[in-house]
Amino acid sequence: MIKNIEMNQEYDIKKKLGDRIKFLRKQKNFTQEFFAEKINIEPQSLSNIERGKFAPSIETLQKIATALCVQPYELYLFNTLTPIKEIKNELIAAINQSDALAIDLYNHYISQKPKALR
């Protein structure tokens, strides 16, 4: 029974990773064919990765992250699949309702900005 649970969890992670890769690929308006060529794998292999059938190798994972302009760990941020437009609209609405929030977000933004750009 424990083996079945472990396999289901493993599949779930592969599925979530595939969904995340697909989400980020579509944000870049890359077709599967174009993206597969860009990362030097077969389109069918990319399809299998995006459907959670197979996990990419470390080398392929690095190529995927580089091609999508993200750090490899960002491919595992499964809870951030909300479209960026929706995130921006929600933030704007919240900022419009609270000056304190606007100030806090601005201060955080300034603290994260590279010193050369401040």
Image (cartoon, rainbow, N blue to C red):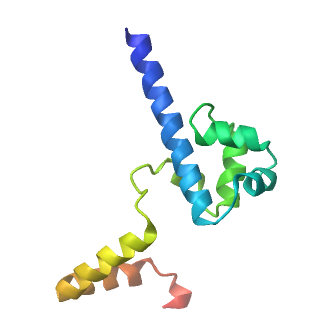
Give residue 85's position: percent from left, percent from top: 43, 73
State left or right for residue 100 relative to residue 21.
left
Q: Residue at x 44, y 12 (%)?
A: 3
State left or right for residue 1 relative to residue 47.
left
User: Count the marks: how many?
Assistant: 0
Q: Compared to 56, does 76 lie above or below?
A: below
Q: Compared to 111, does 49 lie above or below?
A: above
Nearest the eye: 83 or 60: 83
Give residue 74's position: percent from left, percent from top: 52, 54
Q: Residue at x 56, y 43 (%)?
A: 18
Q: Residue at x 49, y 27 (%)?
A: 10
Give residue 28's position: percent from left, percent from top: 63, 66
Residue extending furthest toward the top: 1
State left or right for residue 81 relative to residue 34.
left
Q: Residue at x 44, y 23 (%)?
A: 8
Nearest the eye: 61 or 103: 61
Give residue 101's position: percent from left, percent from top: 22, 81
Q: Quadrant of the N terminus?
A: top left
Q: Quadrant of residue 4?
A: top left
